[in-house]
Image (tube, rainbow, N blue to C red):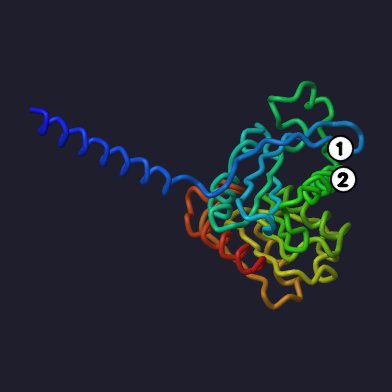
Amino acid sequence: MFFNNYITTFVLVLALLKAYDATALQAPDYELQKHIVTTRDGAKLETTFFKVKSRYAPVVLLIHQCDVDKSLGRTGFENIADTLAKTGINVMFYLQRGYSAAIDNEAETTRTNSGDRVKDAEDVWNYLKSLNHVDSTRVALGGASCGGRVCIGLASEKPNLAKGIMLLSTGMSEPLYRQLPLLDLPLLCITAHDDGLAYNSTLRAFDSTKNAESKLLIVKGELHGAVLMDSHPAVLGQIIHFFQQTLR
């Protein structure tokens, strides 16, 4: 009886150790953090930071789209961030003004002007680069829809900041087209074929860039923004590959 109990206990311990090892192997190799960034005019922006364990790692700053129902501001970039962080790349994304349920009265200070949104992005970047485990010489930007316009504006204001920009369903105006050749950065331009303005803008943005490493990805349908990744899994793979190559 004692011997049988001993064997049973030994087998149970082995099973528990095996389960523990499996859990450890599956655990993400990063720390998920929440930060609050105070802008130059005193507004509070809620950020999510996927902090990798390497002390001095590259970083991607992602900027969400300005959807009408304000739901996609809280989702859409998690898969990108999770996958990149597992490969050793820090990722931060933040909720633009009016998109955070956790910050009181933020909707009253919602910024609809692209120039003002760029100032907020600049404040987030200044905070991000102050974190001592971030390699501020290896930075890439990514944005969906209006977030892509903010990325272009931020890169224009800080010409030496980014190594590349991912533009997802980004409609543009004439001044932005004129800025792209001046930046001379690799672009990943993604759009759905039937997405109207975003489709036409994406084609023109790709034609405007002088960088030979820029890439254009067109998928079927009319979906706009982050939801493209749900219906077209290859989009996520292309985004990950672009950031890895840009920050290598």
Q: Where is 105 relative to 206, above or below?
A: above
Q: Is residue 69 left or right of residue 38?
A: left
Tell me which residue sits at (68%, 59%) in the image: 58
The mark that comes first in sequence, 1 or 2, is 1
Total residue callouts: 2
Residue 53 visible in the snapshot = yes
Q: Which of the labelled discs sits on residue 150, or is there none?
A: none
Q: Is residue 193 left or right of residue 154?
A: left
* Residue 229 in picture, x, y percent from top left: 53, 51
Please name the amino acid that badge 2 sits on.
Lys
Contact between labelled residues 2 and 1, with CB atoms less than 8 Å apart: yes
Tell me which residue sits at (81%, 64%) in the image: 177
Q: Is residue 168 left or right of residue 138?
A: left
Q: Which residue is mark 1?
A: 39
Q: Quadrant of residue 107?
A: top right
Q: Secondary structure at mark 1?
A: loop
Q: Quadrant of residue 183?
A: bottom right
The quadrant the N terminus occupies is: top left
Please name the amino acid that badge 1 sits on.
Thr
Q: Secondary structure at mark 2?
A: helix
Residue furthest out toward the bottom: 212
Q: Which residue is mark 2?
A: 119
How far apart, in angstroms, are the residues tagged by discs 1 and 2?
8 Å
Of the pair 146 and 19, the residue shown nearer to us: 19
Q: Where is 89 relative to 93, above or below?
A: below
